[in-house]
Image (cartoon, rainbow, N blue to C red):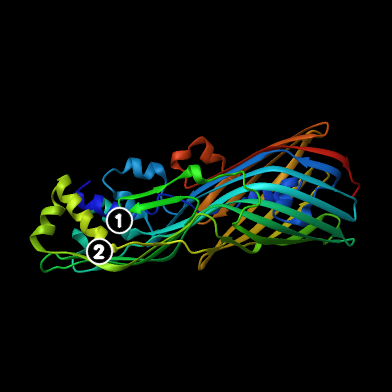
Amino acid sequence: MSIFGKLIWAVSFSFFSLQLMAQADLSTMMCKQLPQSALFNPANLPNYRFAVTLPSLYFGATSSSVSIQDIINNKNGSWINNLSANNSLGTDLNIETVGIYFGSKKLKFGIHHAIRSSGNIEYPKNLADLIWFGNSKFIGKTMELGPKIDFNSFHELGLAAAYNFGKLTIGGRVKYLSGIGNISTKNNQLSLFTSDDIYQLKLTSDFALNSSGTVNYYSIDSLTFDSKQLSFNKLFGKNSGLTFDLGANYDVTTKLQIGVGIHDLGGSINWKDNVQNLNSKGTFEYNGLELKNILYSDSTNNFDHVLDSVKKAFNLVQTNTSYKSSISTRYFATAQYKVSNSLSLNGILFFESLAAKTVTSFAIGGNYNLFSWLNIGANYAAKQNSTFNIGLNTTLKIGPVQIFALTDNILAIANPYNSRNASGRIGVNVLIGKLEN
């Protein structure tokens, strides 16, 4: 990569080393035999007198436009042609440490704790194009380069209740959030103009980055992501917030049940502890032959000289002012049809609000009780820019112990580098005293 590429990388991607976007955990929401489905719809609180969910793990990752294999197989950069004008990368990591549920047919309660990490980064095609090929094809044009980023990691402590009115069950949950770490952009304007006359380079910024517990800033060439600051032992810290879940199920007939829900309604965290705000508003210019020598040189001295100029021009201002970050809200509608005591068919329509846009997913599938102790299922799901996903799930019940594993895309497990969407969940539950329907 030329010095020019190194310069753009230093100015832009040094801020944005995370690749994050929230995932739609469709398989879990459709597996109503699992207490974990109640994490999304509190009307699904387990149909047992007493239940305990032991630690379970969920992981999801997605890329809206390209896979890792696309980049490896196209070292000449042709993979960039597959990018949209704006693209997303992301991951979710949720650790449900414990959940306790109890109640009767009419009234159920639940309490749970989880550690959640989720977020979103959007980047323009121009940025990848510039880093890979340089700016020659953009002479005389202004390129918009600024990514958007929003990352949250936090403790979640939830208290839920569900009440049955006969055919209708309504559930709700209030969740206390304790922030662990955050990185989010408030402003993300970053543009580049290269003059077609004297190769004058003009880089303009109106950029603001908020962080808590994660970023150490000393200068533009010494800005680091410190994962050691992501302490998981502060359940009741200074960074706090609330969010709510609402859900309802209605038995249309003895075989057909429909449901609706809202997950993380009004969710936000106020960040007050270990806060840093980085702001830059200015213009950096480089002129004539001096710039031309830099563009076609691999000299470290030239690069250092440019970086010194960038430091002065961007003039990053650091403050320590508290701020608020939002949790994306999710909406869903479900349907389950019991063909027989052993076979059920399921469907879900899912919406998630991310920044200024809404992401839509849907899935259809079925579950079958192969034996009294073994349930298996499969589903087809269409997600953002990933229209073909085959999911599998299996639940093994030995006495009161329930063991499960599921994924929304089994093809990603077989060939992870060639997939733009991957997810999975595993865990163990203890279920005691099944309630009669």
Q: Position of residue 131 (x, y in %)?
A: 27, 53
Image: 413 above or below 334: above
Checking the image for residue 313, the label placed there is: 2
Disc 1 or 2, which lies upstream in sequence? 1
Nearer-the-camera pick, 392 or 2: 2
382 or 248: which is nearer to us?
248
Task: For the residues labelled 1 and 2, say whether their Cβ atoms are less than 8 Å apart.
Answer: no
Q: Residue at x 33, y 56 (%)?
A: 12
Marks 1/2: CA distance?
11 Å
- Note whether residue 263 is visible: no
- Specify whether 421 is left or right of 43: left
* Residue assigned mark 1: 11
Q: Residue at x 15, y 50 (%)?
A: 302
Q: Residues within 10 Å of mark 1 (few under 14, many from 20)?
A: some
Give the foreground label among 1 and 2. Answer: 2
Q: Is residue 164 left or right of residue 87?
A: right
- One can see residue 102 in this view: yes
* Amino acid type, callout 2: Ala
Taking depth in this image into account, of 65 and 399 the one nearest to the observer is 399
Residue 323: image x %, image y %? 52, 64
Q: Position of residue 111 (x, y in %)?
A: 77, 50
Residue 331: image x %, image y %?
65, 62
Q: Which mark is residue 339?
A: none
Residue beneath the point at 13% across and 58% down = 291
Q: Residue furthest top?
A: 398
Could you tell me which secondary element the residue under label 2 belongs to? helix
Q: Which amino acid, by three-letter code, is at mark 1? A: Val
Crowdedness of circle 2 by 10 Å Cα count: few (<14), some, many (20+)? some
